[in-house]
Image (cartoon, rainbow, N blue to C red):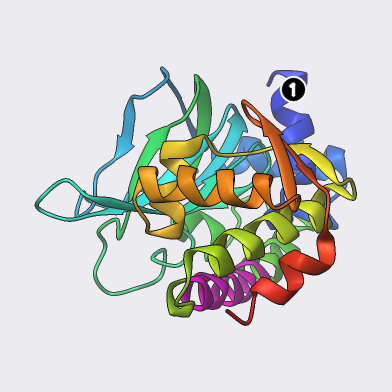
Amino acid sequence: MKKSYMNALEKCLLFRGIPSEQLSTMLECIKPKIESYKKNQYITFMEDKFTGVGIVLEGEVILAKENAAGNRVIIDVVKPGEIFGEMIAFAQKKVWPVTALAQSSCTIMFMPPDKIIGECPKMCESHRQLIMNMLSVVSEKAINLNRKVEYLAMKSLRAKLSRFLLEQYKKTGKPMFVMPLNRNELSDFLNVSRPSLSREMCRMRDEGIIDFYRSSIQILDEEALKEALDS
């Protein structure tokens, strides 16, 4: 397996605590499926048959909910070493609850649920750790879904945008960072219109709260963003 793939897998929470040598042995035993996709290519559609938990090895994947009118709400952006599909892996209804789209050219490893919790033919020492990690990942995802509900519950666009910017600030540790989503994707994630989002960002720039150029954002007044959370 490519070294870059192994680097991504070693960062994946699903394999936390499993040494590299044991991870290689486990993958030989499980024999996961690896697929490559081009930018903007659909990986799964909502209601498609579920085939396995996806682990991003290269590129990025957008997870979104879509309605019959074609409107979508972005649930998450999945990067190398991160996984998707774990919430549905052990449900009775084996269909994808979201649409997965390649945000860039990407490579995905799919692991069938029975390979994760089933008995390992080679009795790999780390298989028990894999099962425990899966439970941990599902719990973390439930917490993240609660975060998404909090976004939807916010009444003002400024509150939603401020929350997102503060999260990126905390994640990067820097007041200037590159946005992980473009304007269209961010408006879908916040569930607001693109023009409204652009107007609000311009207002916040004019008020000296933020500055931006293309995909780069600089936070100038952190306290103003925190105050906006209550608006």
In terms of secondary structure, what is the magenta stretch mainly?
Answer: helix
Residue 94 percent location from the top left of the image: 26, 62
Residue 163 percent location from the top left of the image: 65, 65
* Left or right of 36 on screen, residue 2: right
* Left or right of 81 on screen, residue 60: left
- Toward the front, the furthest residue is 206
Decide whether residue 147 is among the magenta residues.
yes
Query: Is 5 rendered above or below residue 64?
Result: above
Number of labels in the image equals 1
Q: Image point 65% across, 38% down: which residue?
A: 179
Viewport quadrant of the C terminus: bottom right
Q: Decide: few, some or many residues near mark 1? Use Cα within 10 Å; few <14, some 14-19, many ≥20.
A: few
Viewport quadrant of the N terminus: top right
Is residue 136 among what the camera can see? yes
Q: Image point 63% across, 66% down: which residue?
A: 137
* Left or right of 207 on screen, residue 148: left
Which contiguous range is marked in magenta?
A: 135-151
Residue to which mark 1 is pinned: 4
Secondary structure state at the residue bearing disc 1: helix
Corner quadrant of residue 44:
top left
Q: Image point 66% across, 36% down: which residue?
A: 80
Residue 193 percent location from the top left of the image: 34, 50
